[in-house]
Image (spheres, grey):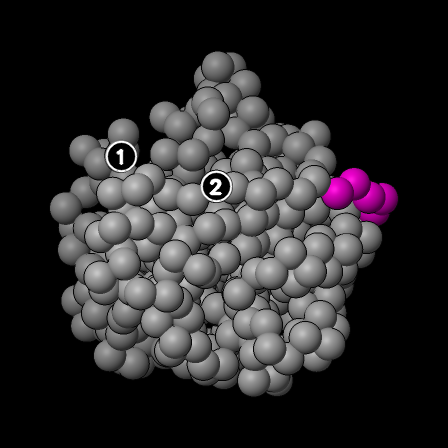
């Protein structure tokens, strides 16, 4: 099947950052086991005196999404290197600056801030503390020598997910919705939408996407990353409109989608979910049997690499950009659906991945890293 080159360009996505009232949780963690420290000492001599820290956004470290994946990356570095760690879990936007300030005051060598919404606080604290190092997930707006962006071109993997959804739907309708209308959310929705359009072009089909229009850059959002009830309502509405593959881009709100799909399927529907950020099959507390695949950002690996480089004295502010080529983003395994995804679809997805990497297919969301 011939794959023509395709360029996808859209108008600039809207930025938003609003969250509610506060609480601060600050926890210090001890050192890694002695054996790990001994092994690390020979290859990473700076590890014993190094403290790596992390501040979550309001989703918390158990969000089964990007906060949790980033935290696990720091814990991996702790185990491998024998560094000390500290963490601060934010409950609301008002916690961001106090949490970051606490990290700096407690002697953190590098502090990872998780999410676009922490950009203002990170920029302020980095400017006030030029000797401290910071790494921020999902933001590339800070131009500072001591801040390293960790960003992802998730539109690439989401394009594959959209193609998969279009090739899997039995109703001819699929859906997606976001938590907040911010670039790190809409980049998934752009890729998903365009993957469906590509499927339609290749197969002469007319699969519809509910919840997002990449041409107009507008769609369905819950307005936050906490209210699972809104996620359930959105998903129920999509299912009632005929969608049978739904991709929530909303952190813990996506658990509402799992609930809605579980109920709908118990009543005779055959709906499926595509998760984002982490492999939902491994992270959601229930309903994993309905997860077709996930659009994964390998944040843990990136955090581990950035911390290790800093321990070894090799910190720099050049952005880390996760792509399909460097395996920073990926389409997760199909797990329980593996036998139901045809060999033809698997082969086509492999070819699409290769074509995106080579540039034959150009996936260009307005929110993609430039």
Element assignment for label 1: helix
Q: Nearer the viewer, residue 27 or 160?
A: 27
Q: Which residues are magenta?
A: 20-24
Task: Identify the residue under disc 1.
Answer: 335
Q: Disc 1 to disc 2, how far (Cα)?
A: 36 Å
342 or 79, which is in the foreground?
A: 79
Q: Residue furthest right?
A: 21
Picture quarter with the N terminus: bottom left
What residue sits right under mark 2 in the picture?
A: 30
Spot occupied by residue 34 in the image (x, y as percentages of width and height): 30, 42
Disc number at residue 153? none
Q: Position of residue 54 (x, y in %)?
A: 56, 54
Q: Nearer the viewer, residue 220 or 196?
A: 220
Residue 338 left/right relative to 322: left
The residue depicted at 44 percent of the width and 60 percent of the height is 49
Is the stretch drawn in magenta largely helix, strand or loop?
loop
Q: Is residue 172 magenta?
A: no
Q: Is residue 28 visible?
A: yes
């Amino acid at each position: 099947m011939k794959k023509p080159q395709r360029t996808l360009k859209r108008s600039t996505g809207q930025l938003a950052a609003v969250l509610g009232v506060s609480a601060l949780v600050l926890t210090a963690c001890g050192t890694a086991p002695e054996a790990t420290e001994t092994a690390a000492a020979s290859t990473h001599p700076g590890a014993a005196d190094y403290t790596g820290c992390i501040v979550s956004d309001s989703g918390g470290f158990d969000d089964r999404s990007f906060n949790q994946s980033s935290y696990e990356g720091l814990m991996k570095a702790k185990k491998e290197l024998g560094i000390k760690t500290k963490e601060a879990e934010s409950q609301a936007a008002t916690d961001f600056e106090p949490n970051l300030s606490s990290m700096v005051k407690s002697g953190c060598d590098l502090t990872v801030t998780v999410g676009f919404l922490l950009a203002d606080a990170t920029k302020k604290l980095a400017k006030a503390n030029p000797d401290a190092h910071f790494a921020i997930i999902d933001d590339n707006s800070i131009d500072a020598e001591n801040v390293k962006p960790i960003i992802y071109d998730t539109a690439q993997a989401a394009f594959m997910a959209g193609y998969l959804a279009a090739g899997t739907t039995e109703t001819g309708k699929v859906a997606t919705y976001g938590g907040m209308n911010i670039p790190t959310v809409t980049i998934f929705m752009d890729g998903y939408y365009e993957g469906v359009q590509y499927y339609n072009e290749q197969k002469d089909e007319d699969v519809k996407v509910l919840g997002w229009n990449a041409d107009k850059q507008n769609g369905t959002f819950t307005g936050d990353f906490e209210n699972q009830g809104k996620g359930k309502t959105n998903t129920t509405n999509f299912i009632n409109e005929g969608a049978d593959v739904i991709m929530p881009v909303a952190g813990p709100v996506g658990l509402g989608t799992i609930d809605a799909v579980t109920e709908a399927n118990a009543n005779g529907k055959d709906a499926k979910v595509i998760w984002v950020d982490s492999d939902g099959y491994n992270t959601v507390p229930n309903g994993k049997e309905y997860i077709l695949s996930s659009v994964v950002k390998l944040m843990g690996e990136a955090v581990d690499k950035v911390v290790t480089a800093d321990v070894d004295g090799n910190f720099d502010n050049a952005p880390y950009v996760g792509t399909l080529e460097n395996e920073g983003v990926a389409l997760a395994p199909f797990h329980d659906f593996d036998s139901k995804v045809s060999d033809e679809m698997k082969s086509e997805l492999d070819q699409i991945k290769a074509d995106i990497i080579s540039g034959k297919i150009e996936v260009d969301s307005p929110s993609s890293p430039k």
